[in-house]
Amino acid sequence: MNGTSALDGRGCYPLFCCRDWPGLREDIDALGEDLVSLVLVTDPFGDFDPHDLGACFPHLFRPYKKHFVVDLRRPASTWPEKTHARYARKALQSVKVEYLADPLEFASDWVALYRNLIKRHTITGIARFSPDSLCKQLQVPGSIVFRAVHCDETVGMILYYAHGDTAYYHLAAYSDKGYALRASYALFAETLACLRSTVRWVNLGAGAGIAGNVEDGLSRFKRGWATGTRTAYICGRIFDPKRYRDLVRACNHCNHTVAGFFPLYRSGEST
């Protein structure tokens, strides 16, 4: 942390996944000598007992966001919503969806599309990925990438990560033409259909922002594809109470009115 030798930790962005949840507490306990605090957001498909996980994180353990999920074993006729299905059919008259066996071949397209997303939504903080970061994300084991094409031009791309029997929607980005053609509907319709042969579940994530507003545009879009929701929990643990209190007292940017923010000494930092 700036101005101090203290260290804190947080789980991988945006979700913390674990193969051996029962063994997590032993690993977390072993971090005590190195960190002031630790915060993470659980995988909604995590195979953990909430009581046990709450004991591992005694200072903060509560439901955080509802993630929209798709059960791909459900009959295709029962989802998506009719409006989404209609938009998808119309978009697919102009847009073709392709699976990318070698995503790096289209890395420059991916960077350009995401740059457009940054500009369109004024993205800042950790989600304002650099070109190098975006290219590396295409190479993560388990990545599944598709693109939307109109007249030989890439107008949208979507990235999932497969983990076990679940595919996690990570990012999608579109050109201005892609937005005009509603390429997002074509991409989601076709990719969800393709994923039926490889995974049981798809996690589409939650709404935007810290609170995950269920009525924002992103939530409405994801809800239209989903067959249900699952809860992600936010977990926090203080390993060094004295240092934690000292950091809060010394913090000039802390917003003490943010209920439940953890760790509190980071509440005023840009994200």
Image (spheres, rainbow, N blue to C red):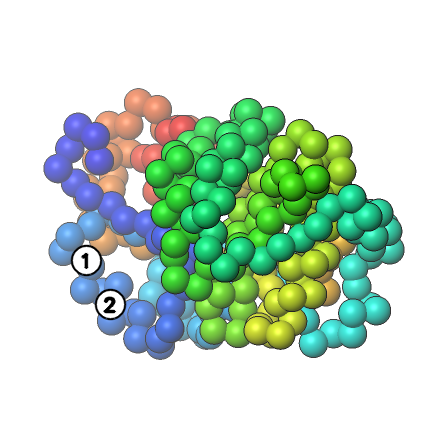
Kind of residue indicated by mark 2: Asp
Q: Nearest the camera: 92 or 127? A: 92
- Position of the C terminus by quadrant: top left
Give residue 52's position: percent from left, percent from top.
40, 72
Q: Which residue is identified by label 1?
A: 32
Q: Residue furthest top?
A: 252
Q: How many marks?
A: 2
Give residue 249's position: percent from left, percent from top.
26, 30
Q: Which mark is residue 27?
A: 2
Residue at 35% from the left image edge and 38% from the top image edge: 132
| Left-right relation of 65 to 215 | left
Q: Is residue 183 visible?
A: yes
Q: CA distance from mark 1 to mark 2?
A: 10 Å
* Residue 22: quarter of image: bottom left
Q: Mark 2: which secondary structure? A: helix
Question: Callout 2 environment at 10 Å: few (<14), some (14 to 19), or many (20+)?
Answer: few
Residue at 67% from the left image edge and 53% from the top image edge: 97
Nearest to N terminus: mark 1 or mark 2: 2
Q: Is residue 64 visible?
A: no
Q: Residue furthest front?
A: 152
Residue at 16% from the left image edge and 40% from the top image edge: 6
Foreground mark, 1 or 2, reads: 2
| Left-right relation of 14 to 250 | right
* Residue 72: quarter of image: bottom right
Kind of residue indicated by mark 1: Gly
Q: Mark 1: which secondary structure? A: loop
Q: Nearest the camera: 262 or 79? A: 79
Q: Nearest the camera: 165 or 48? A: 165
